[in-house]
Amino acid sequence: MNAVAPIALTGMNAAQHTLRSHAHNLANLGTEGFRRERVQQATLPGGGTGTSVVRLPVAGAAMAEDLVGQMQASHAFAANLAVFKTARQMSQTLLDLQA
């Protein structure tokens, strides 16, 4: 149970990176020759997720994809935050039981 909070924290960080990347893409919709970026996620050996940002090989906008991506990242952040809060509550309950 000790690993739950750090794993949820890596999920929150991944969601933040994804949200930032989609915002960057939307902010540059009108930039000629702009190549969008995408966040790739990978499972870390000890649990959790790591991220890396890659540029797409072809220039072009995908406004709908970036808007939906922002919403998904927002929900992923909220879900990981709920896990983080629940782990904290469980730890507190265990401490209360031992007292």
Image (cartoon, rainbow, N blue to C red):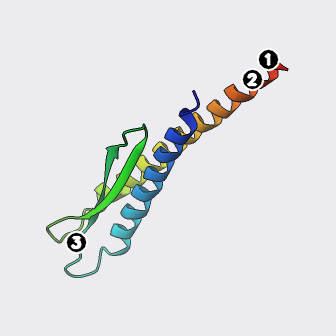
Q: In which image quadrant can residue 85 be found? A: top right
Q: Secondary structure at mark 1?
A: helix
Numbered disc in front, either 2 or 3: 2
On residue 97, the disc is: 1
Q: In the rendered image of this protein, does residue 37 appear above or below residue 81? A: below
Numbered disc in front, either 1 or 3: 1
First in sequence: mark 1 vs mark 3: 3
Mark 1 and mark 3: span between their CA atoms?
A: 55 Å
Quickly name the residue at label 3.
35
**Residue 86 in the figure: left or right of residue 42:** right
Disc 3: CA contacts within 10 A as few (<14), some (14-19) or many (>=20)? some
Q: In the rendered image of this protein, does residue 26 appear above or below residue 97? A: below
Label 2 close to label 1 by CB (< 8 Å): yes
Going by the numbered disc 1, the residue's amino acid type is Leu
Q: In the rendered image of this protein, does residue 63 appear above or below residue 44? A: below
Q: Secondary structure at mark 2?
A: helix
Quickly name the residue at label 2.
93
